[in-house]
Image (cartoon, helix red, strand yellow):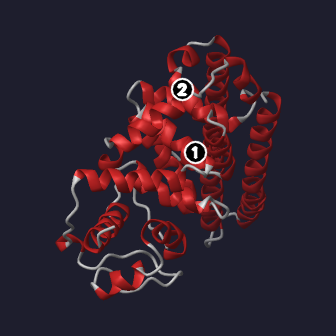
Amino acid sequence: MDEKLRISKAIYLLYLIQRNRIGINVKWAVLKPLMSFLFGGNIFNELKDNLVISTFNEDATLEVININDLSYDIDQQAKEELFQSVISYFAKFDEVSGIMHVVYLYRKLATMIVETIILNMNINCKSCNPELKLAMPIIVSDDFYYSKAFADYSKNEIKKLKFDINSFTEYLNQKWFIKLIIMVKDGEYGNYSYSKTSENIDPEFYNGVIFLIKNDGLASIVMHLDEFLSNKKINNAITKYNYKNLRKEKIRRFYDWLSIANDIAVGMEFLVGSFLFLPNHNELDGVYLFIIGSSQLLIRPMINIVRRAHLFLLSKINR
């Protein structure tokens, strides 16, 4: 490979990763294997000598120097060659190949799911696949998505996908799967609010979705989306989940108002009781009010305990 073109390709790839639109920060510890595979082990010093990067220490986050002034000399053919090599590197990781299939089939929906996965990675995922986190900024970029290399790879892979609606029924009693179905359904009809809620930011959801992606289950669903979303069992599971959430919300509101009413009563009892301790008032009644108010201070945590127990029992009954 021409040395100048090699450096330009490396700069271009770093630009894609750093300027990604889904807010991923990549550490050099994850990036180095890919860069070494594509450009050789001496590429890091060359980038540093060319003032493209200031460090490539493994604990450091990728930061291209003066990225807004960055220039690279790379044509479409060179990009295609680069993307072909990138695909050959990532295709060996099931999570990455699985998400590439989903992106190719339904980019808008896949990007929504990717963003939710990233939220999980950034917030509470200690065992997330580092290659997946590295691949995502590249996969969702316009240049990669519209490349011939990606199209050729995806068309060949999509032919291998198999779909059997019955193979998904075993997941219908698992909350993470119902959350995913709702996200897919909302995304299909243009509502992306569900993907941004804290409901989907938990390890159970992340691990379940990644498992489905690894086995190309999510790609199969997306490929046969109309059939999947029109299935009676799938819709019954969504209805049951939504009904249970509605009941939970009503229960939460009831106990919230009960707690507020209790707090107001406590405040009034202590306030009136304090007035009764003023001269020429009935101090005994004030003492009784203080006793009642103190008792109601104990009721506050009891309301919270009963609320939690009620919600827990509801989850058990409707599981």
Q: Is residue 264 visible?
A: yes
Residue occupying image coordinates x 53% and y 62%: 122
**Residue behind mark 2:** 159
Calculate the distance from the C-alpha at mark 2 to the C-alpha at mark 1: 31 Å
Q: Is residue 144 above or below residue 158?
A: below
Image vertical order of residue 179 relative to residue 139, above or below:
above
Number of marks: 2
Q: Earlier in the sequence, mark 2 or mark 1?
A: 2
Residue 47 locus on image (x, y percent): 34, 81
**232 or 6, nearer to the observer:** 6
Q: Amino acid at mark 2?
A: Lys
**Mark 1 secondary-structure assignment:** helix
Q: Residue at x 66, y 34 (%)?
A: 177
In which image quadrant can residue 300 be found? bottom right
In this rendering, would 90 be left or right of 174? left
Residue 192 seen in the current view: no
Q: Quadrant of residue 315?
A: top right
Query: Which mark's residue is nearer the viewer, 2 or 1?
Result: 2
Q: Residue at x 50, y 36 (%)?
A: 102
Q: Position of residue 190 (x, y in %)?
A: 38, 28
Mark 2: secondary structure:
loop
Identify residue for label 1.
200
